[in-house]
């Protein structure tokens, strides 16, 4: 019934969708196995993509040929560029999506690909022969064989849902958990752990008094995630901001005795940076209010997502507390919030390609690796799909360095440092964030994607070339144009910038803080004529590049120094225990991770600079 596939992807969440598409776009025959065809790409938690650091990841996924950015653009109900008050290196795109349209668009996109087949079933066992993954066995007893397998099981592995004192098996509300896989992987030598996440109640928007909430509109001139010219919506929906207050906290505390988190029924570690509402009022008892975001679920539904009110307290406690929030006095609840515990596998058991060390041709992506968030899952799926295809062609793995992408930072952190709590990306995790901006992801990564034999990259490469030419044009025009103090000083005075004393090139003026290219074009109309044909997105990117040139150059020099350590390779069978000069912790960690280079070894938690020096001396460096 099932012919031999190149790649089998287990799970059709954000990681699974990107993995299937990435492998299929590299000429692989892909089988996507999912428990429910109706929940492909379902936004299980909030109906949004992007945010601080996460938005950069979505743009990187798009630059590498993934579809998360395109699907978000096509289904969004609101777009905002966060951190506009800070420097452009911190700007982060975020979009609210229509939950149903998002999933529907992803499914349509996948079904349109001739290289992807589907099967609705649950995988209960892997086929492992000769130390390599050779397929899967489903609960209906079907054997689906393939040359590589990518597991993207999300929160379904032995998942348990908690609501107050109630608990039952499930990977998501209304969907059963997956059993058997964890136990098989453990029998193969894999270590596993437990993590926890949660979601807030869903509310009836018709029962909320929005006039008593703060309005949060989208950007007046919304941008987009994809570097391709996707459609910009003519209208947007508004989000709103609400706040808890002492009366809300008092009601929530009445449920603490029945809380699975405080009673010890939940043993998994939850996300530190996205705590439940009961965790917030317990940890920050001195605060009399917490901010909540009221987010619409789509164009044609009244359902609302209450971001910031994740809870596993009893339903009646959640409901009573909600009704004490200003504007929520008559609120109706569609379903309560809940917590979910699930199995994950410490990602130090992976190589940087996301292939497992213990079983060849077996890849892990998404929450199975201990991460949280759609964006973190999607980028892992993309990388796993690319590397599965490359492995089958006996080509070198696709590995992004920390200086190339936030995706590189994420995977490097997971593999070399591991995680004991749900891993979430932040800009602070990246050493080279001035280089890793959201505006230049295509320049950084699209040529890298082309090197992996991806089909249909022509339009993207063409736009990258157009963008590079636009950058050169802006640079040339500003370098060749200058202004007198009489021309520019009134503008400089209006923004609090020091006046000029002599004629100065516009390129030098643009590097000043608060000076904007759009203003210079008004002050010097002749350059406006020269720059008019340039795509506004390209012009803005060129402006950011010029402003950050000096800082980026210093980061690049540092990255190149560190890159030299990446070129010093280490053999996978290197016997670290034979080097008695290494610390015992270093010998243990290096033997377990088996780093591919000195650079990777230097980033392993517990390996000190002196350990690296010993390795360099041993290697004659």
Image: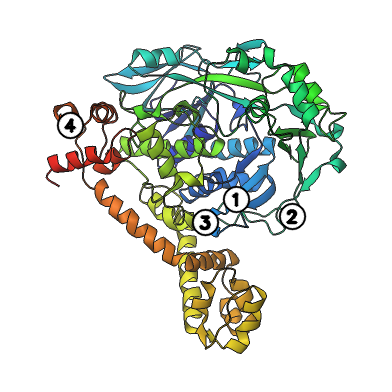
| Outermost residue toward the front in this view | 286
Mark 4 and mark 2 residues within 8 Å of each other at the beta carbon: no
Label 4, label 1: how far apart the Cα atoms are: 44 Å
Number of residues whose C-alpha sits closer than 10 Å to that of mark 4, classed few (under 14), some (14–19) or many (20 or more): few
Label 4, label 2: how far apart the Cα atoms are: 60 Å
Judge whether 152 appears above or below 188 on screen.
below
First in residue order: circle 4 vs circle 3 = 3
Which residue is the site of mark 3? 89
Judged from the image, the secondary structure of the residue bearing numbered disc 2 is loop
Is 295 displayed left or right of 24 in the figure?
right
Label 3, label 2: how far apart the Cα atoms are: 28 Å
Judged from the image, the secondary structure of the residue bearing numbered disc 4 is loop
Which residue is the site of mark 2? 234
Which residue is the site of mark 4? 574
Question: Tag on residue 93?
Answer: 1
Is 543 displayed left or right of 297 in the figure?
left
């Amino acid at each position: 019934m099932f012919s031999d596939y190149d790649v089998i992807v287990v799970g059709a969440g954000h990681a699974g969708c990107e993995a299937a598409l990435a492998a299929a776009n590299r000429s692989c025959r892909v089988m996507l196995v999912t428990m429910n065809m109706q929940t492909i790409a379902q936004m299980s938690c909030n109906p949004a993509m992007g945010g601080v650091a996460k938005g950069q990841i979505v743009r990187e996924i798009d630059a590498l040929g993934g579809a998360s950015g395109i699907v978000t653009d096509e289904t969004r109900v609101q777009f905002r560029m966060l951190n506009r008050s800070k420097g452009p290196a911190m700007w982060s795109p975020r979009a609210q999506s229509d939950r149903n349209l998002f999933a529907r668009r992803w499914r349509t996109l996948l079904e349109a690909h001739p290289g992807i087949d589907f099967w609705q079933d649950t995988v209960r066992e892997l086929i492992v022969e000769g130390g390599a993954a050779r397929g899967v066995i489903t609960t209906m007893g079907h054997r689906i064989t393939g040359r590589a397998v990518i597991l993207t099981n999300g929160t379904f592995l032995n998942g348990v849902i908690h609501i107050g004192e109630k608990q039952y098996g499930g990977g998501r509300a209304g969907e059963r958990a997956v059993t058997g896989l964890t136990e098989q992987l453990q029998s193969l030598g894999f270590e596993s752990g437990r993590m926890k996440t949660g979601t807030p109640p869903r509310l009836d928007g018709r029962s909320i008094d929005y006039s008593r909430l703060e309005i949060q509109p989208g950007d007046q001139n919304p941008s987009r995630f994809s570097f391709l010219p996707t459609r910009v919506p003519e209208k947007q929906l508004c989000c709103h901001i609400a706040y808890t207050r002492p009366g809300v906290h008092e009601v929530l505390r009445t449920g603490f005795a029945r809380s699975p988190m405080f009673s010890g029924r939940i043993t998994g570690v939850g996300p530190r940076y996205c705590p439940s509402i009961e965790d917030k009022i317990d940890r920050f008892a001195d605060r009399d209010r917490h901010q909540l975001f009221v987010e619409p679920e789509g164009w044609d539904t009244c359902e609302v997502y209450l971001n910031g009110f994740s809870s596993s307290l009893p339903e009646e406690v959640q409901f009573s507390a909600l009704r004490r929030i200003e504007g929520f006095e008559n609120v109706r609840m569609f379903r309560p919030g809940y917590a979910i515990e699930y199995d994950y596998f410490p990602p130090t058991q992976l190589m940087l390609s996301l292939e497992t060390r213990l079983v060849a041709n077996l890849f892990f992506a998404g929450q199975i690796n201990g991460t949280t968030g759609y964006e973190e899952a999607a980028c892992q799926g993309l990388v796993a799909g690319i590397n599965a295809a490359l492995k089958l062609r006996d080509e070198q793995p696709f590995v992004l360095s920390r200086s190339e992408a936030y995706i590189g930072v994420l995977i490097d952190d997971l593999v070399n440092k591991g995680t004991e709590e749900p891993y979430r990306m932040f800009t602070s995790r990246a050493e080279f964030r001035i280089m890793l901006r959201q505006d230049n992801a295509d320049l950084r990564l699209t040529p890298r994607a082309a090197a992996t034999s991806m089909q249909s990259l022509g339009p993207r490469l063409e736009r990258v070339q157009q963008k590079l030419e636009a950058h050169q044009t802006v640079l040339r025009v500003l370098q060749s144009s200058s202004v007198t103090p009489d021309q520019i000083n009134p503008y400089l005075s209006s923004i609090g910038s020091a006046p000029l004393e002599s004629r100065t090139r516009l390129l030098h003026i643009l590097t000043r803080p608060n000076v904007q290219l759009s203003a210079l074009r008004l002050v010097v109309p002749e350059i406006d004529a020269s720059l008019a044909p340039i795509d506004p997105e390209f012009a803005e990117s060129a402006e950011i590049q010029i402003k950050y040139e000096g800082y980026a150059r210093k980061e690049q020099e540092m990255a190149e120094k560190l890159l030299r350590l990446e070129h010093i390779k280490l053999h996978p069978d290197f016997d670290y225990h034979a080097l008695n000069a290494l610390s015992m912790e270093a010998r243990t960690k290096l033997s377990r991770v088996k780093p591919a280079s000195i650079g990777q070894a230097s980033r392993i938690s517990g390996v000190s600079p002196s350990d690296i020096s010993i390795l360099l001396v041993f290697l004659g460096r």
